[in-house]
């Protein structure tokens, strides 16, 4: 039997005025998702927790079956370090290091540095000479890179850092790193110095090779991650298809097969056909594939609900439809697919929201709930499964009937959080946003 989870990062949203008071899920033309929904079960999943950042690292760990309260290393950057080929030792800290554009009036103008090309960004990053031997800069993808501070011996939670995509057009001075203890403030002072001094280096680089980048921006501090192997935990050989380094790092930490995919950028220009080819190739040799698409999340961070809707329609036509066609032709009545976002990303302000996410699961042994379309409104009232408890029943051959009894059983009697998350003010991937 073949199992696929398609995680559409940031897919769920609030109603948007530009969409006539609808969400992208409601406004988009998605015949393949509609067909999957009609044959499957619509439910909801809790993928956020009040004590953890509401963001992709926490939510994707949960969907993959790893309790983020136990395994989340306070940020995504340590997983990105694994993807870059380096590991953290005890006492080390990793930071996401974005190339960003700062406006003349000192505001966060563009968290992608004009969607800087990976090769150009790599040349810029590798050319920077670090003044402190304990600080190591590693190249990632496009605007997303990684800084490691060796022997920092500062817990990540003692640093206050801000995600640039949540603070577009805001003044940067209040968003520079701050420490909440004397040892953390000493480190924060070095981080601020690195960030501010990077502006002179990048300005000099731009004289030779013009880019939209003007500054390195540090956020998402994290310590060394440690995950139990996926195969020995769930009894299935798994592979992961994605364009984001932190997810590749999660795969490496969990012993899940993954590869770099040319054209898989983790942005709105990602190559969905390449992701489809890798997914199908993996399905020939692996039991389970986790397929992640980030384009909708990026569109929402750009505060563009129209683009987010187009990205959803593009995904439906170029990825979901052909994938379902492959499964039905090659594994008739012997497959199961779950599609869900990892979290809400709100197109009107570019932030995340911890509300339980809508999902659909279809395929072998899944009883239909009779829904015609998947949407946030359609899922209202559906029982909420705890995200970390989804993997076991999804990978089993037992029947799925998304009702109170089924969800209570997979939650092991533990109530999922719903209203508590709605009212909570959570740390949003490095910044404070409600």
Image: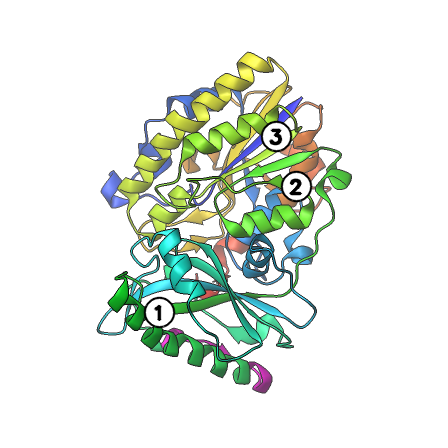
Q: Residue at x 44, y 19 (%)?
A: 35
Question: Label 3's element?
Answer: loop
Q: Quadrant of the N terminus?
A: top right
On screen, 313 above or below 89? above
Q: Earlier in the sequence, mark 1 or mark 3?
A: 1
Q: Nearer the viewer, residue 212 or 390?
A: 212
User: What segment is highlighted magenta in the picture?
Assistant: 174-184
- Front disc: 3 or 2: 2
Q: Position of residue 139 (x, y in %)?
A: 48, 59
Magenta-drawn stretch contains 412: no
Q: Which residue is mark 2?
A: 256
Q: Quadrant of residue 279?
A: top right
Q: Residues within 10 Å of mark 2 (few under 14, many from 20)?
A: many
Q: Earlier in the sequence, mark 3 or mark 2?
A: 2
Q: Nearer the viewer, residue 386 or 80?
A: 80
Q: Nearer the viewer, residue 27 or 401?
A: 27
Q: Position of residue 325 (x, y in %)?
A: 49, 17
Q: Position of residue 229 (x, y in %)?
A: 73, 45
Q: Residues within 10 Å of mark 1 (few under 14, many from 20)?
A: many
Q: Is residue 163 visible?
A: no
Q: Which residue is mark 1?
A: 215
Task: Check if mark 1's residue and mark 2's residue have beta carbons within 8 Å.
Answer: no
- Mark drawn on residue 403: 3
Q: Is residue 230 visible?
A: yes
Q: Quadrant of the C terminus?
A: bottom left
Question: Which residue occupies the extreme right position in the image?
Answer: 232
Q: Is residue 265 left or right of residue 133?
A: left
Q: CA gap, disc 1 to disc 3?
A: 50 Å
């Amino acid at each position: 039997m073949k199992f696929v989870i398609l995680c559409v990062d940031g897919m769920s949203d609030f109603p948007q005025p530009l969409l006539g008071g609808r969400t992208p899920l409601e406004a988009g033309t998605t015949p393949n998702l509609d067909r999957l929904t009609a044959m499957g079960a619509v439910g909801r999943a809790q993928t956020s927790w009040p004590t953890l950042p509401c963001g992709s690292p926490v939510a994707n760990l949960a969907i993959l079956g790893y309790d983020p309260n136990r395994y989340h290393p306070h940020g995504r950057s340590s997983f990105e370090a694994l993807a870059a080929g380096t590991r953290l030792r005890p006492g080390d800290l990793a930071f996401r290091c974005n190339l960003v554009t700062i406006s003349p009036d000192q505001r966060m103008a563009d968290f992608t540095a004009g969607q800087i090309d990976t090769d150009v960004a790599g040349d810029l990053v590798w050319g920077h000479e670090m003044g402190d031997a304990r600080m190591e800069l590693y190249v990632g993808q496009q605007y997303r890179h990684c800084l490691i501070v060796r022997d920092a011996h500062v817990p990540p939670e003692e640093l206050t850092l801000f995600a640039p995509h949540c603070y577009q057009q805001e003044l940067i001075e209040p968003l520079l790193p701050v420490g909440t203890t004397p040892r953390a403030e000493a480190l924060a002072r070095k981080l601020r110095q690195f960030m501010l001094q990077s502006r002179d280096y990048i300005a000099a680089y731009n004289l030779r090779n013009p880019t939209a980048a003007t500054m390195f921006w540090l956020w998402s501090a994290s310590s060394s991650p440690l995950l139990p192997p996926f195969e020995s935990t769930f009894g299935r050989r798994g592979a992961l298809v994605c364009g984001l380094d932190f997810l590749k790092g999660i795969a490496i930490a969990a012993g899940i097969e993954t590869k770099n995919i040319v054209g898989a950028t983790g942005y709105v220009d990602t190559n969905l056909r390449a992701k489809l080819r890798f997914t199908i190739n993996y399905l020939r040799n692996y039991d389970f594939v986790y397929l992640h698409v980030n384009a909708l999340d990026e569109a929402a961070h750009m505060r563009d609900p129209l683009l987010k809707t187009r990205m959803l329609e593009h995904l439906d036509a170029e990825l979901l439809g052909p994938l379902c066609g492959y499964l039905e032709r090659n594994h008739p009545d012997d497959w199961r697919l779950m599609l869900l976002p990892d979290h809400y990303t709100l197109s009107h302000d570019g932030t995340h929201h911890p509300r339980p996410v809508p999902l659909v699961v279809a395929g072998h042994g899944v009883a239909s709930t009779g829904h015609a379309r998947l949407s946030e409104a359609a899922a209202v009232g559906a029982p909420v499964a705890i995200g970390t408890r989804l993997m076991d029943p999804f990978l089993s051959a037992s029947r799925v009937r998304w009702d109170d009894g089924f969800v209570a059983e997979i939650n092991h009697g533990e109530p999922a959080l719903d209203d508590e998350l709605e009212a909570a003010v959570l740390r949003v991937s490095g910044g404070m946003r409600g």
